[in-house]
């Protein structure tokens, strides 16, 4: 509960919270409701610091005047009682005068009376002065009391105004409290609705988290399958590369062996042809000598010798034809070698295309990870396709290599047979 604390003129107010009542306060025995009502009606006495300071200030002015007034009244009463015709008091005053004035006992009574009259006059003058001072003080006190009463009236009016304002504020406060209670009830209903919505959202989030966990598991399994497929593909590529290298080595060895065999065969053919030519030359020389001898000796057998010469010429032509055939075979072997090299290049291009196909399949596998529902089926299909293609390529490559090796062997056997 907030109250307004005003100064003496009723301006420059500030809103402050009600302080807790100290244990020394007179309101300690009251309940909290009674304390709040008392404070709302009369104000907190601890907060009206300026009023308390004003009262202290007035009391500080009045207190010494009252004390002086009491002292003067006491002295006047004492003097009036002493001036009465009471023997005891008179003797006491005389003895006091004697002591104060240092009069001797031999002094006359007239002197003592003279001193007594002087002291009485002084006392009367003093009393008059005191009475004047007292009258002045009384007037000042009356003025102060009038100011105090005016201040009290002002404070009462101020408190009444504040009470009216506080009552109006308390009414507004209770109205606002009722509105707050109504709003609180509405908020409670809304809070219950929001709690239900939160529970439903939590359930949905739990189900979504479960689905996400399943999705993550499926993705993890798919990635594992992808890694396994990649390992299998890499193993297959290594096997294909190894088989390619082995077949290439074999082909190179076969080609080198064919070159060596062909070179050896050509050398042997050249040696044989040179031997045949030398033999033919020797035979021709011998035959010429024989012909000369026969011409000299046998003129009749000239036709036979001519036929024999024709036969030998035919043999020479046949040998030349064989040499041309060997040259053609060598050219055919070179053509076969070029064809083998072209086929090798075709195989390399096919292997490159196969690598590109495998890369495209990897891209397809990476794209297929986005579709969770069709991931497994598509991965299995791609796996089957890859395995089938790899097996097909392997079979085709093996069949081609076997056919070429078989054809090369046949060609070599035929060449060996022809040679």
Image (cartoon, grey):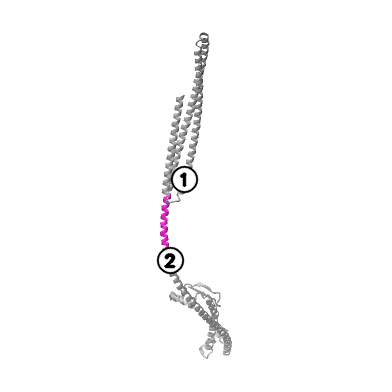
Q: Is residue 399 left or right of residue 108?
A: left
In magenta segment, residue 209: yes
Please provide percent x and percent y for residue 245: 47, 35
x and y percentages locating residue 253 in the rendered image: 47, 30
Q: Which residue is mark 2?
A: 191
Q: Main secondary structure of the magenta part?
A: helix
The CA span between labels 2 and 1 is 53 Å
Label 1 near label 2: C-beta < 8 Å? no
Which portion, as a residue range, is magenta?
197-219
Residue 183 position, x and y percent, is 45, 70
How dense is the environment of label 1, judged by Cα within 10 Å: few (below 14), some, or many (20 and up)? some
Residue 102 shows in the view: no
Sequence-first disc among 2 and 1: 2
Q: Residue at x 41, y 59 (%)?
A: 203
Q: Is residue 208 visible?
A: yes
Which numbered dot is residue 362?
1
Q: Secondary structure at mark 1?
A: helix
Q: Which mark is residue 350?
A: none
Instruction: Tell me if residue 112 comes above or below residue 218 in the rendering.
Output: below
Q: Residue furthest bottom?
A: 85
Q: Nearer the viewer, residue 335 or 231?
A: 335
Q: Secondary structure at mark 2?
A: helix
Q: Residue at x 47, y 32 (%)?
A: 251
Q: Is residue 125 above or below residue 342?
A: below
On whether residue 195 falls in the magenta region, the answer is no
Report the front residue among 23 and 415.
415
- Using a 10 Å C-alpha cutoff, classify the residue at mark 2 as few (fewer than 14 neighbours), some (14 to 19) or many (20 or more): some
- Residue drawn at (48%, 29%) of the image: 256
Q: Position of residue 411 (x, y in %)?
A: 45, 29
Nearest the viewer among 234 and 115 is 234
Q: Give residue 99's quadrant in the image.
A: bottom right
């Amino acid at each position: 509960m907030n109250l307004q604390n005003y100064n003496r003129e009723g301006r420059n107010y500030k809103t402050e919270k009600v302080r807790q009542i100290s244990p020394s306060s007179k309101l300690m025995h009251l309940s909290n409701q009674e304390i709040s009502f008392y404070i709302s009606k009369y104000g907190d006495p601890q907060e009206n610091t300026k009023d308390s300071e004003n009262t202290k200030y007035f009391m500080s002015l009045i207190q010494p005047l009252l004390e002086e007034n009491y002292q003067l009244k006491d002295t006047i009463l004492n003097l009036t009682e002493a001036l009465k015709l009471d023997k005891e008091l008179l003797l006491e005053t005389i003895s006091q005068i004697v002591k104060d004035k240092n009069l001797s006992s031999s002094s006359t009574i007239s002197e003592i009376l003279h001193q007594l009259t002087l002291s009485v006059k002084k006392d009367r003058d003093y009393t008059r002065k005191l009475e004047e001072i007292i009258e002045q003080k009384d007037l000042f006190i009356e003025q102060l009391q009038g100011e105090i009463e005016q201040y009290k009236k002002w404070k009462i009016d101020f408190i009444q105004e504040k009470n009216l304002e506080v009552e109006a504020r308390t009414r507004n406060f209770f109205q606002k409290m009722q509105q707050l209670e109504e709003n609180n009830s509405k908020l409670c209903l809304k809070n219950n609705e929001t709690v239900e919505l939160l529970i439903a959202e939590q359930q949905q989030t739990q189900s979504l988290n479960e689905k996400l966990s399943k999705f993550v598991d499926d993705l993890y399994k798919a990635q594992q399958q992808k890694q396994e497929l990649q390992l299998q593909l890499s193993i297959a590529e290594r096997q294909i590369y190894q088989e390619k290298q082995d077949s290439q080595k074999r082909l190179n060895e076969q080609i080198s062996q064919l070159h060596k065999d062909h070179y050896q065969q050509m050398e042997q053919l050249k040696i044989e042809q040179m031997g045949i030519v030398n033999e033919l030359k020797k035979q021709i020389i011998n035959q010429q000598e024989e012909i000369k001898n026969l011409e000299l000796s046998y003129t009749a057998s000239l036709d036979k010798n001519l036929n024999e010469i024709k036969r030998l010429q035919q043999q020479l032509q046949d040998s030349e034809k064989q040499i041309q055939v060997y040259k053609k075979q060598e050219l055919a072997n070179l053509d076969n070698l070029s064809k083998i090299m072209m086929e090798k290049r075709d195989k390399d291009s096919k292997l490159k295309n196969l690598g590109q196909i495998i890369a495209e399949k990897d891209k397809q596998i990476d794209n297929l990870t986005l579709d969770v529902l069709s991931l497994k089926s598509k991965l299995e299909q791609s796996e089957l396709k890859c395995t089938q293609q790899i097996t097909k390529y392997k079979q085709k490559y093996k069949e081609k290599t076997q056919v070429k090796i078989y054809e090369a062997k046949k060609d070599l056997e035929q060449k060996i047979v022809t040679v």
